[in-house]
Amino acid sequence: MERKKPYTYRIPETLKGKVYEQIGKLLDVDAGLIEESYSDTAHPVVCIYKKYGSVRLCVDYRTLNAVRKPDDFPMKNAVDLMYNIGKANIITTLDLLKGYWAIPMDEQRKDYTSLKLTEPITGLMFYLLCSKMPQ
């Protein structure tokens, strides 16, 4: 992937407190979800409003997705899934909230998943590196 100067999206002033609070929780050593990084490649953070007023942090990985190799396994379509469910005696659902954080990321690939914020946190500019697979 070609190394380009990281760009950022402006975080609205009204959301900065919520954004940096979430980043602080993710940086917490006990959580171990993200870590400080100084990668040459970084992707901008996008704030999305959730249904009840909270904010979801997303990372714009379009430049990474444009050069990555597609997954080799096919996804089932909805008709096949409904056909299989129709034969079941018992059906259950599991809410795996933030389950994607449990998927380990290859150390050699972490450099490509860095994200960049517009302003420093506690006086330093952080490039945050997802240590577990992002959404």
Image (cartoon, rainbow, N blue to C red):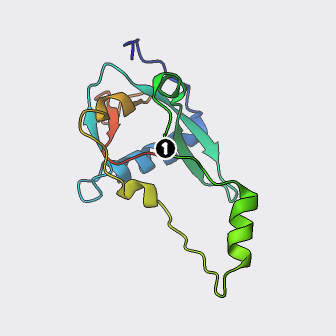
Question: Image quarter for residue 41?
Answer: top left
Nearest the viewer among 42 and 108 is 108
Instruction: Please identify the quadrant where the N terminus is shown.
Output: top left
The answer, for residue 118, to whether it is visible in the render is: no
Q: Residue furthest bottom?
A: 89
Where is residue 28 shown, x and y percent of the image? 28, 53
Nearest the viewer among 94 and 128 is 94
Element assignment for label 1: helix
**Label 1 Cα crowd, 10 Å radius (few <14 / some 14-19 / many 20+):** some
List the residue tagged with mark 1: 19
Where is residue 87 shown, x and y percent of the image? 70, 79
The reply, left or right, for residue 34 in relation to residue 86 is: left
Residue at image x 30%, y 29%?
111
The reply, left or right, for residue 42 in relation to residue 14 is: left
Residue at image x 33%, y 51%?
33
Q: Of the residues shown, which amino acid type is indicated by label 1?
A: Val
